[in-house]
Amino acid sequence: MTQSAHAYAYLRPSAVLDGADGRHLDLATSGGATPLGAVANPRFFAGFLADPAPAAAALLAVADVAAARYYQPQLRASLDPVVTANGDRLRFESFSGCCGVYARLDVLRAGLDGDEIGHGTTNVDVNNPLREALSRIGPADPLHLAVGPDALEVTSLDGPLVEKKVPLPERWLRGFAETQVVAAGFDLRAELPAAEAVRFLRSLPRGGGRSSIGWVVPAGRTLRPTTRPVPGAVCLPGPERLVALQRVLRHALALRVYGPPAGAGPVASAWEVVLPGMRLTLTLSPDASRGFSGEGGVLGALATGTVEQDAELVAVLLAWEPRIEVGDLAEQSGLSPERVRAALTRLGTAGQIGYDTAEAAYFHRQLPYDAGRAETANPRLRAARALVAAGAVRLEEGGATAVVTVDDHIQRVRTDGAGRVSCTCLWWAKYRGGRGPCKHALAVGMVREGAQGAAKGLEA
């Protein structure tokens, strides 16, 4: 697995400090992007948390996911969460080390009381003393929150006091790219009031046994388990992976469950606990042994010929907006909604796009990666481009069927009247499109797009 060293440089450790005006939660930042460019230690917010106890518990839940591996848990995982300031909220995000659980805490304007919320993205230091201090925060005392250092502190220090270097797998970046594609296909499937939400979540296993895949179906004000994906059911793959939500149960106002329509096999799902002025969401991959990085949902968009140029155009329109609507971007850019979605998918491969299931909208963040880095690291996409370059694809008359020759093997790719693609290869037989297109289908799509472009050129 390809890894690169990712360096964090903090001016001091994050900490909960006691001051004359109460307790202060100071979150140290490292290497952030802002509207003014890259900043070594950006400052995004200073003020009070409206509800300190649930906020502290929710931050710990995000940190729990960053430190966990739900598959092969004996291997260590330690990545500092990402924080994005979108002008009207703060978003804290993390991935589990196995890349199968994505956590996000949205602290909305109602949960903050202070100065202007900035714009930008950075990492925040989460250390063991901070975790211990957060676990002791109760509801009685006000809690001041600072995301980033004060200007005086920046100028009075000669250099970073805390440095960390961690191995950052490519699959972590690819996981960020895949989750926004997966979540964009979710709809709200169930909403439980506080008491039922607590009862249901406390009934789930906390680990220690074999990971299982099951489904739940709405039943009045609660959820009941079912052994198969009946209509209206939501997949709950590896229920022990929701253990981080246990931290916030006593503060929960409701539980919302999101997912795609139930199909024949396991699918991803999102579990959102509504808190005072906040939302904590865990998104689960279709299986505990199956990280988001291999889902392949981005491949179809990345294989189109115009996506790179479209992404460059769309990128200048984002501006750390908390809600990005495809229709608005299409109007501003002059692109079709389909091309805008493909451009957002490519930007997602650089970690620049996330998706908020609660608001059914994309949002902008800026991670320190090049657009297309995940594309070049994807073996199926590289293999598809190699097939096209080798002339291995032949479109049959009518264009609905294509033949792909690989060494001495021939695969047939068919497209039905509804645009659904199938292939005769073993990958397709195993996953049936559930993990994105195979290399043969990708190669056929590239050739078909090139042929359509050439035909339009002749017409012109």
Image (tube, helix red, strand yellow):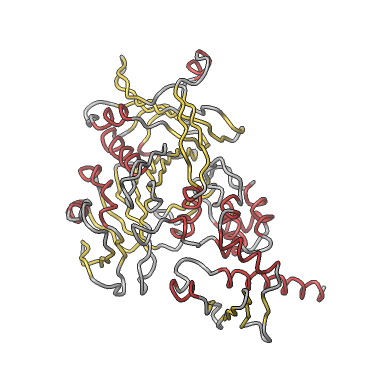
**What percent of the width, then of the height, locates residue 142?**
28, 26
User: What residue lies at 62% left-to-right and 83% top-to-bottom?
Assistant: 400
Q: In the picture shown, does residue 62 fall above or below 19?
A: below
User: What residue lies at 28% left-to-right and 52% top-to-bottom?
Assistant: 242
Extreme residue toward the front, this view? 408
Image quarter where the C terminus lies is bottom right
* Nearer to the camera, 332 or 260: 260
**What percent of the width, then of the height, locates residue 365?**
52, 43
Horizontal side of residue 295 vs 34, given as left or right: left
Extreme residue toward the bottom, this view? 397
User: What residue lies at 43% left-to-right and 41% top-to-bottom?
Assistant: 91
**What percent of the width, then of the height, locates residue 216?**
25, 65
User: What residue lies at 49% left-to-right and 27% top-to-bottom?
Assistant: 9
**What percent of the width, then of the height, locates residue 27?**
40, 28
Q: In the picture shown, does residue 218 fall above or below 276?
A: below
How many numbered marks, from 0 up?
Answer: 0
**In the rendered image, which quarter is residue 309 located in?**
bottom right
